[in-house]
Structure formats: structure tokens, C-alpha cells
Image (cartoon, rainbow, N blue to C red):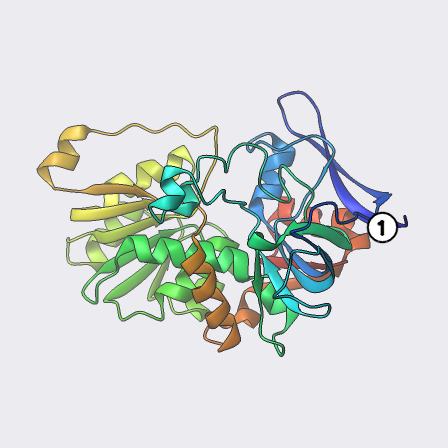
Amino acid sequence: MGKMLAAVFHKKGENGGEITLEQVDIPEIKQNNDVLIEIKACGICGTDLKIMEGAHPANDNVILGHEFCGIVENIGEDVKDLRKGDKVVIDPNLKCGICPACRRGYDNQCEFLATDQTFGIFQNGGFTKYCVIPRRALYQLPIDIDFTKAALIEPLSCAVHCHNIAGVKECDNLVILGAGPMGLIIESIIRKHPINQLFVVEPMEFRRKKALELGANYVINPETDDVEKEIKDLTNNHGADVVIDAVGKSSTFEIAQKIWASRGRLILFGQDSRAVGTIKPNDIVRWQRSILGSYISSGVDYLDAISLIKNNTIDTDKLISHKIPLDNFLSEGMKIMKEKTGLKIIVIP
């Protein structure tokens, strides 16, 4: 059994932990339905940073990285539809397929998602050279797809799911709170749909500029501008028909409740387990508003995301800011994440 370099998370109590680069054993197939993947690209997610900070759970001594793709290196004896060399992308959120949620078609709400199932969070993931994945968690990719772009399929599938929940209409005014990587990916999809006006609220200048490049009509700096006044003025005092909170903090939840229109829809996408918000129930009733959560993605969202990448519908060059070797994961990748000086960072093992 050989060794490989991996980014391993080590827990420190209940307050996060640290990631170290270390040599680990190359995994082997143990189940007949397993597939050994040679990883070609893996995106760094904000969740990886939150794991370090203690804002998202993860198992101790696990290889992180849940946005990854690669090539089939070996297959278990029961796998009949894949061959060595096939390109695949991983759905890291392993679903059981038999719980009531899965049987009803809501596999992103699988009862077992939070029970040590997710690859790159609770099981070994993609910040390394090889990973063993059950066949049911793999989607085959077109032979000519670019791996760097394919590493965006997992977050893109989550953005597709969010877009579908939002139910965007042509006459809607839509606000995205946060122009981090996920906010911008969501914007990229929203912009493929006819819409009245699209606003992005973001404190960092380079991210506001990127939001304009991707098609936002207006960008607003919440640190210097009165967000409520700006939105009301730009919508003729109507407000936002759809608000997508791509941050998930208490402060953005409060902003959302100041800018939504009557019959407005607030989609909570960003996650932070430390966030706490308040709401006035009467405002929901009186103005017939809705608050909806958007959590990861379902199988059909993955198929849509693969098509978006395959057909170059999404301008991935505007979303990927860095492409780095695994050796530079800590010195460059996580440094950029902490300082928020990049967008989507793709790690090449």
C-alpha cells in the first residue's frame, strides 16, 4: 500500500481545529459497489473554513474536500456501468434512497445525511490523490469536460437548487446578499433567467465589481450605503420580491427583513450554526411573505449542473480565481479563504 499527500482536519474540542498536510495510506476498495477515484480537481468551500473555525461540524482525522471530480482508477466487482478512465463527479452527500424523504423525491433531506455520511466532512474527501466512493454517489461526465470546470458542479448544483426554490419570475426584483463564491454562482444562474432587476449587496469592492461583470444591475455596499433606502429608491418603493441570503449571518437576516416586498420570498442559503435571528410573525401574515431554506441539492440538480458546465452556459472563468497544487493548500489556498481575497479556488492534487 502506497502513500499520498492529504489535507487532514484535526479537531480541537468544540471550537474547530486545524488542517495539516500529511502522508496517508492510499485507500483500497473494500465493498463490491465501491469505486476508486483518482482525483483531478477539488474546490475549496467556505464550509472548509467554517469547519476550522468551529461553525460547522466535521469528524476528527478526516480528509477534507467535498467539491471534487476525477477518473475511475478501479471498480468493485458489482459495478457494471463504469470503466477505468471514465470521468466522474462526486455527490459528497450520500443519500440512503429508502427513508421517507428519499422515497418522496426529496433526497437532499435524507434522514441519514447528518449521520457521518458526507465525503470531505465526515468521511475522507477530495483534498488528496485517491478516494474510494460508492457507485451511487458518482455521476459520469462527458469525455471532453474540463476537470477544473467540473470541480464547480457540486456548488453549482446547490445554486441550481436555490434558483428553483426561489421561483424567479420575469417581473421580479431580486436581491442577493453576499457576493462570495456561492453568491456569485447563484447570480450566474439567476442571470440566465429573464428578470426585472438584480441587486447584489456586498461590502468588498472587488466582489462588487465581479457581481457587475456577471450581470447585476446595481451593487450596494452595506458598510457605507443605506441598503433599505437604496433598494426602495431603485424599485420605486416596492422592495425585493426575492431575497437570497448567501451569507447566513444574523446581520444579513435582519437586512433581508427590511427590504422585501409584500408577498416577498426570502431564501436562506448561507449557513452558520452560530447565527440567531428574530422575526415579527405579524409581518409575515400581513404581507403574505415566505421564508424558505435551500439545502444542498438533489439528483436532478446535479444533472442540470453537469449540463450547464458541458454546454458552457456558465462563465466559469469569471468564477475561478485561483488554481493551486495541493502542496500550497495551507500557504495559499486557506490563506486566500481567510483573507477573502479570491473567489473559487481549485486544488489540483
What x and y, as percent, mark residue 247? 44, 44
Residue 225: image location, x then y, percent: 35, 49
Q: Pick out the residue farthest to the left.
A: 286
Residue drawn at (46%, 64%) of the image: 303
Q: Which residue occupies the foreground of this view, 40 or 326?
A: 40
Can you say whether 3 is above or below 70 in the image? above
User: What residue lies at 39% left-to-right and 33% top-to-bottom?
Assistant: 250
Q: Quadrant of the C terminus?
A: bottom right
**Residue 115 placed where, x, y %?**
54, 32
Compared across the picture, whether 299 is left or right of 327 comes to left
Residue in front for this viewpoint, 288 or 26:
26
Count numbered badges in the picture. Answer: 1
In the image, what residue occupies the spot 53% across and 61% down? 153
Q: Residues within 10 Å of mark 1 (few under 14, many from 20)?
A: some
The residue carrying mark 1 is 4
- In the depicted structure, whether residue 307 falls above or below residue 47: below
Left or right of 18: which side holds 157? left
Say whether residue 223 is visible. no
On the question of residue 69 being in view, the answer is yes
- Left or right, residue 81 beside residue 62: left
Amino acid carrying label 1: it is Met
* Secondary structure category for the residue under label 1: strand
Q: Residue furthest right?
A: 2
Q: Is residue 180 left or right of residue 238?
A: right
Height in image: 234 above or below 258? below
Decide which of 169, 222 is in the foreground and name it.
169
